[in-house]
Amino acid sequence: MRIIEKSGALVRSLTPAEDELLVDFARGTLTGPRLLQANQWLMKIRSANQWLACDCRKDALPVLNVSLNGSTGTLFLRNNPETPEHTPGCPFSKDEREAGERADENAAPAAWLAPDAPLRLLGDYRRASDGEAPATPREPGERREQQRLLSLLLTWIEASGLNVYATHLKKDLTAQFADLRTVASRYPLLERVPASNYLETRLDMKHMMMLKARLREATVFGNHRRHGLLLDCVDQVKGRKLFNNRSEDGFDFQGHHQYWGGNRASGPLLALALYSPATAGSHFYELIHVASVPVLSRGHLFPVYRDEEREPLKALVSLIDWMAGKGVKVLMRRPVIGGQVMDELVLTSDQDRVLSVSLLEQPIGPEPDAENFKRYADFKSLDTFRKYVAGFFMRER
């Protein structure tokens, strides 16, 4: 077995001890420290964006990648699509589990999560009975959709009112996070375990260690996997690292990055991360999956659908404040979940005037033929757009 770059370039061949460890990992016979050792080693390969190439054939190289089970946050080996078949009897041959794992990738779109129902964001570790290999994933019916963490973040944004802006509703950053924590208290991680009890709203080593200490001492998880949540405004998510202004090196995560709107966006981002041991019996806690939503600024957590919205959106916020000073209260709302057109911003005034706008160059979905819908891209400049919106709400004062 060899480690290769995605270009096919050889990095190095595995040592006999590494070969043996990898075979046992693929067969599911590792336990305890050796399983932890294999996971840590495979995580390094995955983080370096490298693949494994099998030497079982002389005429071709079957290629495997280190993948992640979206339900349990644990690693497994997957044969790359269209890769050559292994020789009969090779321990890395394709098997039935891969088809089941691929089902995790067909994630459902983000959906509203009802309060007071256990979230179960991570599956429990599979226990091996006597004589049975400790397989990583649970049964397919028990897998959790990968988008669930993003659904939770978007639900919290909407339930806490972060997707609504009006001058008279303006709050500082402390109050915005307080609202998020209040909403989190309605969402149990497991039965009778409120998410707010195991939630830190600051991503740094101090708060990660505080959360780890609470999780290790907790008895409420019973036989279920211990896990908590970290929520913070970060500068960017790059590769498998979260970066903010409190760490130059960033914070590694081993799982999936779930992002809103189908496109990656620049920061600042409101990020929600799952925090748990990757393997049963481990005392090493790490970030598993991360969900992120772009926000207007570090001090204003209003959601942004695409980077191109930022400048006109800041102009709208400024304009709403100006109109409030003139005695016209305008409220701006963005649907973040359950809607068909997430780029739509709905502005309503206390005089019952309603205007929908899209700040994208190309609106999502069909463009409505209505007088109260306007597309920012149709205006010659940001100034003319501001004047139109101001005139729309001020003309009947």
Image: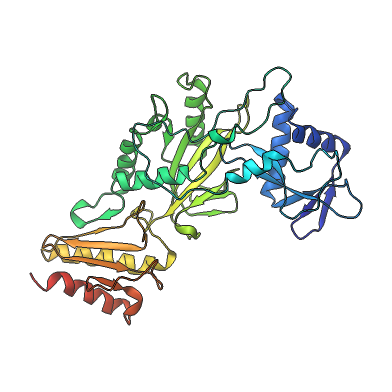
Q: Is residue 91 left or right of residue 153?
A: right
Q: In this view, does 52 lie to the left or right of 97?
A: right
Q: Position of residue 163 (x, y in %)?
A: 31, 53
Residue 359 found in image quarter: bottom left
Q: Position of residue 146 (x, y in %)?
A: 52, 44
Q: How many marks?
A: 0
Q: Residue at x 22, y 56 (%)?
A: 166
| Coloration mode | rainbow
Q: Position of residue 352 (x, y in %)?
A: 13, 62
Judge whether residue 68 can be spotted in this image. no
Q: In this view, does 336 lie to the left or right of 72?
A: left
Between 284 and 56, which is closer to the camera in this rendering? 56
Q: Where's the C terminus, which quadrant?
A: bottom left
Q: Where is residue 99 in the image (x, y as percent from the top left)?
A: 66, 44
Above or below: residue 78 compared with residue 276? below
Judge whether residue 180 can be spotted in this image. yes
Q: Residue at x 22, y 70 (%)?
A: 372
Direction bottom: furthest residue: 380
Residue 354 found in image quarter: bottom left
Residue 40 found in image quarter: top right
Between 116 and 51, which is closer to the camera in this rendering? 116
Direction left: furthest residue: 397
Between 214 and 274, which is closer to the camera in this rendering? 274
Q: Where's the N terminus, which quadrant?
A: top right
Q: Which residue is drawn at 38% across and 40% down?
A: 113
Above or below: residue 40 compared with residue 49? above
